[in-house]
């Protein structure tokens, strides 16, 4: 069972570079989310999507962009990487809204360092 | 704004001990509370989900309780094992947003 798959697992970027974090799920979930986790901190929501073609900002969207062209894929784009974007990024999905009694399923994360 | 607190930040217990992890939240108007487990270098795994109308949920050696009025939840782990060593996070879902609000987690170490 693949579940939620994230690539790459590790990446080092130089300041000002751009990259896309890939996320795909095979559970036919409508809801998908991108979180970041800084050391010793709780997860913060970056962007979320309630279905193909529909995305919205979360708590910390600045410096990021997303798209949702298919149900399965929800890539996260970093433009002009900054040291403040050094973090572990998690993609998650759920069949319904996470705040409405639906379990979240997480990918294994991408550890990103911006130097 | 909802805030979720987990105390202690770290806990070390000998194998076989029963233990309780605590989670508190500031806004009692929640739809649900979830407990997650996170292993080093891995994503989060959902352990238990308690709906706002429920008082507790059980799965194997795990039991989670919810007291909305006091803004508290506990995760009880019976007969702890070294394999239970991980970080445990709680998260609450409320009105007005699709997102969950996460605590910072409790890092549990079970010593053989």
Image: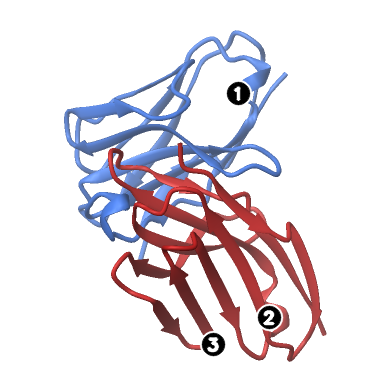
Chain colours: A blue, B red
Residue plotted at (73% across, 91% down): B16
- Give the spatial CA distance, label 2 vs label 1: 36 Å
Viewer-side label of 2, 3: 2
Chain ID, mark 1: A
Asked if disc 2 and disc 1 are in contact, CB closer than 8 Å, the reply is: no
Residue plotted at (35% across, 66% down): A1
Q: Quadrant of the C terminus of chain B?
A: bottom right
Chain ID, mark 3: B
Looking at the picture, tell me which residue is in the foreground, B73 or A8: B73
Looking at the picture, tell me which residue is in the foreground, B100 or A3: B100
Q: Position of residue B71 (x, y in %)?
A: 49, 59
- Label 1's element? helix
Q: Position of residue A19 (x, y in %)?
A: 50, 21
Which class describes the residues within 10 Å of circle 2: few (<14), some (14-19), or many (20+)?
some
- Give the spatial CA distance, label 3 vs label 1: 38 Å
- Label 3's element? loop
Residue plotted at (45% across, 69% down): B67
- The label on residue B19 is 2
Q: Is residue A56 left or right of residue A12?
A: left
- The label on residue A85 is 1
| Nearer-N-terminus badge (2/3) | 2
- Give the spatial CA distance, label 2 vs label 3: 11 Å
Q: Position of residue B1 (x, y in %)?
A: 45, 36
Q: Is residue A84 left or right of residue B64?
A: right
Looking at the picture, tell me which residue is in the foreground, B2 or B64: B2
Marks 2 and 1 belong to one chain:
no
Chain ID, mark 2: B
Which class describes the residues within 10 Å of circle 3: few (<14), some (14-19), or many (20+)?
few
Which class describes the residues within 10 Å of circle 1: few (<14), some (14-19), or many (20+)?
many
In this figure, which residue is indicated by the disc labeled 3? B61
Residue B68, above or below B76: above
Q: Position of residue A80 (x, y in %)?
A: 54, 9
């Amino acid at each position: 069972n693949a579940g939620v798959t994230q690539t790459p697992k590790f990446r080092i970027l130089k300041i000002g570079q751009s990259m896309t974090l890939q996320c795909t799920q095979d559970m036919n979930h409508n809801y998908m989310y991108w979180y970041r986790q800084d050391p010793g901190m709780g997860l913060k929501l970056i962007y979320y999507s309630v279905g193909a073609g529909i995305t919205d900002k979360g708590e910390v969207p600045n410096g990021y962009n997303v798209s949702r062209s298919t149900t399965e894929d929800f890539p996260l784009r970093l433009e002009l990487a900054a040291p403040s974007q050094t973090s572990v990024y998690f993609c998650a999905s759920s069949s319904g809204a996470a705040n409405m009694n639906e379990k979240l399923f997480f990918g294994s994360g991408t550890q990103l360092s911006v130097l | 704004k909802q805030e979720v607190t987990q105390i202690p930040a770290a806990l070390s217990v000998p194998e076989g001990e029963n233990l309780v992890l605590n989670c508190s939240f500031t806004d009692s108007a929640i739809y649900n509370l979830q407990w997650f487990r996170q292993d080093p270098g891995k994503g989060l795994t959902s352990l238990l989900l308690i709906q706002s109308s429920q008082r507790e949920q059980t799965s194997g050696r795990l039991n989670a309780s919810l007291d909305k009025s006091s803004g508290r939840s506990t995760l009880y782990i019976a007969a702890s094992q070294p394999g239970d060593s991980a970080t445990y996070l709680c998260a609450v879902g409320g009105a007005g947003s699709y997102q969950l609000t996460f605590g910072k987690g409790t890092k549990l170490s079970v010593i053989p």
